Image (tube, rainbow, N blue to C red):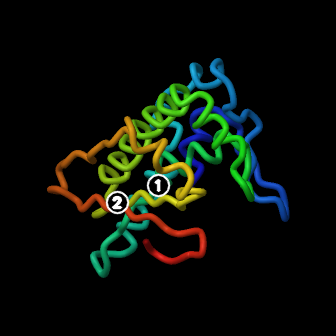
Amino acid sequence: ILTVPDAMGLGLSFALGEGPKFAHPVRDEAAVAALAVPDMARLRYVFDAVASIRAALNGRVPLIGFSGSPWTLACYMVEGAGSDDYRLVKTMLYSRPDLMHTMLAINADSVAAYLNAQIDAGAQAVIHCGDLIGAQTVMPALAHGLPMHLIHGNNLGDPQALHFQMHKSGGLL
């Protein structure tokens, strides 16, 4: 899920028993201003894996590409790690909605580029999935101006672009 923000230069690492962490969380105007859609060449290892898996599947089953949603990525980017209450991202959303919407727009462009590159590498469908992290309290704030992007068609025809949300308990909503 966190390959895209890692390619943005946030410094992803994993510690035993702690889960993923970013060395450079995005918590202020300067950090948001420094964000940009990453060069997809930095994610070549993902696209090489997609091509390799597609070849190994030999048409037996379709290959589905994957990305975290713009909101899920923003939660990790602001918090710097997993969180029980997502206080930092909610604070940014309500105190500086302009920063959150800028980050979401960059994340949406990044996710679209990432999924399209997976399609180009051989994915036959793509999905971006979001955990409804505190959605009951943040969805009204996100509803106004939330960037929406469509995945473009390409030489594979029009692969299916899917979006679904998972409730924190693990059930589909």
Asked whether the beta carbons under mark 2 and mark 1 sit within 8 Å of each other, the answer is: yes
Where residue 54 sits in the image (x, y, percent)? 36, 66
**Residue 90: quarter of image:** top right
Q: Which mark is residue 84?
A: none
Q: Give left or right: position of 169 versus 55.
A: right
- Most foreground residue, 44 or 74: 74
Amino acid type at image mark 1: Ser
x and y, in percent, of residue 40 in the image: 45, 37
Q: Residue furthest bottom?
A: 60
Labels 2 and 1: the sequence-earlier one: 1
Residue under the image location 53 percent in, 31 percent down: 97
Disc 2 is placed on an element classified as strand
Residue 21 position within the rendered picture, expressed as x and y whole percent measured from the top left:
75, 48
Between 76 and 66, the one lying in front of the other is 76
Q: Which residue shows up at 38% across the image and 60% down it? A: 127
Mark on residue 126?
2
| Residue appearing at x 45%, y 53% in the figure | 48
Residue 28 lies in what quarter of the image? top right
Q: Is residue 124 above or below residue 83?
A: below
Residue marked by disc 1: 67
Camera-side residue: 146 or 65?
Answer: 146
Quarter occupied by the N terminus = bottom right
Q: How many marks?
A: 2
